[in-house]
Image (cartoon, rainbow, N blue to C red):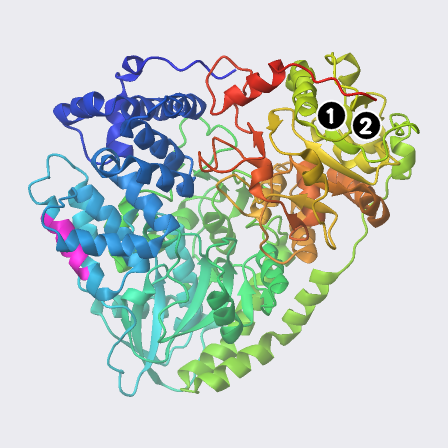
Amino acid sequence: MPRRPLHPATWLRGARRVLRSAIGPRPAASREDALALSHPTTHAALALLASRDVPGAQSLVDEALAQPSPAPDAFVAAGVVAHRRHLHERALHLFDRAGDDALAAAPVPFVESLFRVDPQRGLALTCAWLDDASVTPDARTWHTVLRYVFAHGDDALRHRVHDRFVAAYRGQEQQWPGGAAEVEWLERWRGAARHTTAPAPVGRVPFAVMDYVQPGKGKSSQNIGDHVQTLSSLGHVVRRQNLRFHGRADLVGFAQDMQERVRPELRLDGTATDVELYRVDRDGSSFQAFPEGTWLLEFGWHSHDLAGTGVWDFPMHENLRPIFVSFHCNKRGLLTPEVLDYLRAHGPVGCRDWTTVDLLLSLDVPAFFSGCLTTTVSTVFPELDEHPAPATVHVDAVREPVPDGQENIKQSYRGVKDRTFVENMREAVRLLEWYRTSFTHVVTKRLHCYLPTTSLGLDVDFQPANYADVRFAGLHPLDHDGFEAIRTGMLARLEPVLSAIFAGQDAESVYALWRETVAPEVETARARHVAATPLPALPAEPAALAAPAAVTAPADGAADAVDVVLLPKRGELPHVGEAVRALDVAATTPLRVWLVGPGVARVSVPELSSRTSVLRVPTGSLDLGALGLVPAQRAHHALLPHLLPDVDRAVVLPVDAVVLGDVADLAAVDLGSTAVAARHTSHADPSGFGLLYRAARRLDDAPATAYDFYRRIHARHVFDFNAFDADVLVLDLARLRADGYTAESLVAMREFRIDAREALHLYTGPHRTELDAVWDHVPTRDLPDAEARLVHWADPVKPWDDAYVARQDLWHARVTEPTVRVAS
């Protein structure tokens, strides 16, 4: 049970740390003490958040907002909690209610939520601040504004904000010790213009190599494994011994050194060509300058948004010509319609893993499995004259203890960000040389240690944090032949395309050659993507499986009765009677309330009006073992169409809810061509695929099953669809029976260990009717003053708990309201 909220003074100790991290640079005790005096609720909420007691913080601010005339402090505190929960629309609404106090007490959360919800309003406010000398946000606030202006503003506005940020920091050095590093980091982008065209290198082919910095320091890579990827990609270029490199001296020198290291058997001779080399920031290329027609190999995991704003700097700089290979993506925010057109125009896309292949194919982007570039890093590591004695190195090992006396080497560390690009490239070479000359065996969680050290001939025990990770399908496990197929395939497909590029062929010819080269692989991927591989059937038909617990409706029931289903969890059983009473009090039409699940036979139901009848469907007799399921998967949810065999339409309601409207109106929702009505998710993450991906990650001990699940998800649905709340539903049970929903869901639950809610998402995808959120209002997630016809306490604190939760008075009023007797 969440703990009861305490007096704000209880949390004063420890608030200093969270104030610095959550509301800006305020390490001075006097400033913190001032906040405690001026905004005690905000101060206390932040301290609870610092201790990771989000339910406690939510309860605290709920109670503050419930006061007759909430102070601005209450709205600020509630906005801070909503911001921490990534409920930005709610947060902005609350900050707006707080007025000027939001900027005074929580400027960084206010600015972040503003830009997340309404970027244009954020830009307008930024301009107003710049033009009003009386408005003086601190440096941390201007830094936050600058991050979002990088994502949403034009060059002129970004330059003005950058100047104001630097000016604000001067004199605030003691208030924000970490600010100096941010000022220094951002200096390289000061004055930069987007999509600038650099002078064409006359007589030279422009070619870019991948780096991993961007305006957001926290979002720039600190993993030297990324530079191992770039080293691997460069190996395909420097194989050509007749290329002459030009550009920055350090980059040219490195390329020439790698050219000399190429294995003799992989060296290529060809036409002597001059190549101008450029460094490209994968996650911030639009702020650089490139000549028109600059080529690059485009690869890697595009996981980092621009400066933490939820916006990706993608497509890349308009002057770049990418060849996509070893590409991975799974971010909804990245794959905008513009990006999809970009990938189609520059495809087919060679993907590092099979899940990315299936994701892109679902979106009609031509794609194929290329595997990872790092399998080819051996190109620039000639054979050793002498091999080391047997020895093991652990690299970021996490699954088992590192033996005494052995170091756990880190490939990800802050120092990577402090070095130049070429320094990191040379460090990548040094590290791989050390591995292969000092050890014979590697234990690692890092993909970009496992694959490159395998390429160098070491025996590698790949132990990732989770074997079911979405990134690994096709890359693990790999036997010798599988690994060699990826390595030789990568060499073979890139050789003709890069040769055409360095021969000076035009873009149309190069992309036509690329499409021709990989066409067979694309067709293989498409065939695999749509292949129908049936799963083992259930041991019996769903109706037979449900028969031991199925209950039919009484023949003498009211013809116009609304069927309402409650599916209580174990902890909710003591409150089912209260929920039924609340339903009865609100009813204007006859109700049949079905209590479905284990333990419902023991539920005590109070006296009800004659218009409401209660039917119990205990499911303890269901043979879950025969189905290969466990109770936590809640199979009775999926069996519902057959547990109520003569009910054609039902409303599913949660126990922790109060109906304020007429449930008959809910039951009458037009389902159109769908079988399910539900509201869009009230959680911060809207991704339906994200929900199913998280389910797949539970299959750490069965990664092949997880990879198959990923494929089936993408074969069934186009990436992405909106997740939905599955506690309030309108179901066409007749259609679900006819469509085979139960059998399909139970098989998926058995094979992939998903629960009933996840199975419903897999079955439904985007094909549902959008239920108005008034029928599933979550007072701790939605706007606090939103209209509600059903209030649902979906978060950990329930209305029957001792701790306070918003609108709990509605629950207590309904469960204690006198029963109205209605004549039969």
Residue 98 vertical position relative to residue 287 in the rendered view, above or below: above
**Percent position of residue 267, x then y:** 45, 74
Q: Secondary structure at mark 2?
A: helix
Residue 539 appearing in the image: no
Check contact, mark 1 vs mark 2: CB within 8 A: yes
- Residue 624, disc: 2
Whichever of callouts 1 and 2 sits on the residue coming sooner in the sequence is: 2
Q: Quadrant of the C terminus?
A: top right
What is the magenta segment's predominant secondary structure? helix
Relative to residue 379, is residue 97 drawn left or right? left
In the rendered image, which quarter is residue 75 located in? top left
User: Label 2: how many residues lie within 10 Å, few (<14), some (14-19) or many (20+)?
Assistant: some
Q: CA distance from mark 1 to mark 2?
A: 7 Å
Mark 1 lies on residue: 631
Give 398 or 97, whichever is nearer the viewer.
97
Task: Point out the stretch of residues depicted in magenta.
Answer: 159-167
Q: Residue furthest left?
A: 171
